[in-house]
Amino acid sequence: MIRVGVIGLGMMGNTHLDVYTKRKDVQVVAVSDKNPDRLSGKVRAGGNVKGQAKAGFDLAAFERFDEGMDLIAHPGIDVVDICLPTPLHMKYALAALKAGKHVLLEKPMARTAKDAAKLAKAAKTSKKNVMVAMCMRFWPGWTWLKEAVDNKTYGKVRAAHFRRVANHPGGPFYSDGDQSGGAILDLHIHDTDFIQHVFGVPSSVRSWGYSKETNKIDHVVTHYEYARGGPMIFAEGCWCMSPGFGFSMNYTVNFENATAIFDLAAADTLTLVHQGKRSAVKLDPRMGYELEIDYFLNCVKKGVKPTVVTLDGAANSVKIVEAEAKSIATGKPVKVK
Ligand SMILES: NC(=O)c1ccc[n+]([C@@H]2O[C@H](COP(=O)([O-])OP(=O)(O)OC[C@H]3O[C@@H](n4cnc5c(N)ncnc54)[C@H](O)[C@@H]3O)[C@@H](O)[C@H]2O)c1
């Protein structure tokens, strides 16, 4: 039995608890939130993806702490799951490692690339696992794409467009650019991370964007530049859509011999256009959160370090996002490597 403690009962803490409480190999020992209404369950945070954060568990069944550091000090916990606001990620992950716990850490790895690199360095000398919850690397339809690219099933990728747009989620954390980093760090990092996972770290980025909801970039379009003759890769991320728009996540990838289209709205299927035919590829109906937690817990059980998401990889994503913000500020391409 793996004994878990979850810190932060917002959208993501609730999403992870939904997953843990359905598993037979996990005992949720404790939860923590400094907001008394969230800690008591009086107020439950919801999610932006259908089926997310349904709160099918009773908070009264767990030990409860109003300070995350007290949960970290609990001797009966093996895994600390950190779903705190981004500026607290590095400090709490380092404290959990020091206390001898495995750590699942929500994305982005840290508020700055400097802090992310510091955490990656510290974790290298630890026997415990720290994995950043880069959920797109586990998302059905996105794992399909990674496999198709790696195996060149439909030839090389010529062009790809990833798009993740929403209306602003509201709330104090997302409204404060210094906390969340704006949509470019909080939302768009999912596509930046997936792009470097599949296509490698780009040599440079050229981005366009603007601020609207926070003092950071809230709408970004980036061209990820690869060597001459490489694929044309673009991603758009935004939380400036009109209130009521909801959340949309999709990609179109054009291979030499096929076109693949993913749209979150097309439940559990991917559209593949190949050899003159359009077909629906059936996908695992589970969300990436469930698959990411399954992978992380299996690494803990086997005593191996995660390889699907490495700390250097997650830190690189923060670094690339910072290069994107710099490109917007300067109006020029910015080297990443
Ligand atoms: N993987 C994803 O798809 C995804 C989606 C949304 C958010 N996130 C990330 O997850 C993190 C949390 O996001 P959220 O929407 O759940 O945020 P949130 O602000 O709704 O929740 C964070 C909670 O942490 C609590 N908290 C703050 N300091 C604390 C402390 N010292 N001890 C205990 N509790 C404390 C707050 O009271 C709050 O309830 C962010 O880094 C965000 O970027 C990831």
Image (spheres, grey):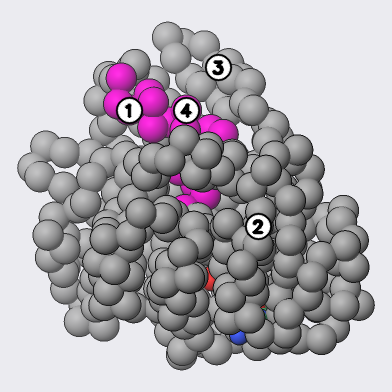
| Front residue of 173 and 126 | 126
User: Which amino acid lies under the numbered mark 1 shown in the image of this protein?
Assistant: Val
- The residue shown at (38%, 32%) is 146
| Amino acid type at image mark 3 | Arg
- For disc 3, the marked residue is 278
Residues at badges 4 and 3 in contact (C-beta under 8 Å)? no
Classify mark 4: helix, strand or loop. Answer: helix
Q: Which residue position holds label 4?
A: 144
Asked whether residue 164 appears in the rendered view, the answer is: yes
Q: How much space separates mark 4 and mark 2, taking CA atoms?
A: 30 Å
Q: Is mark 3 within 8 Å of ligand 1?
A: no
Of 329 and 125, the residue lying toward us: 125
According to the picture, the residue beneath numbered tag 1 turns out to be 149
Looking at the rendered structure, the secondary structure element under dot 2 is: strand
Circle nearer the viewer, 2 or 1: 2
**Numbered disc in front, either 2 or 3:** 2
Mark 3 near mark 1, Cβ–Cβ under 8 Å? Answer: no
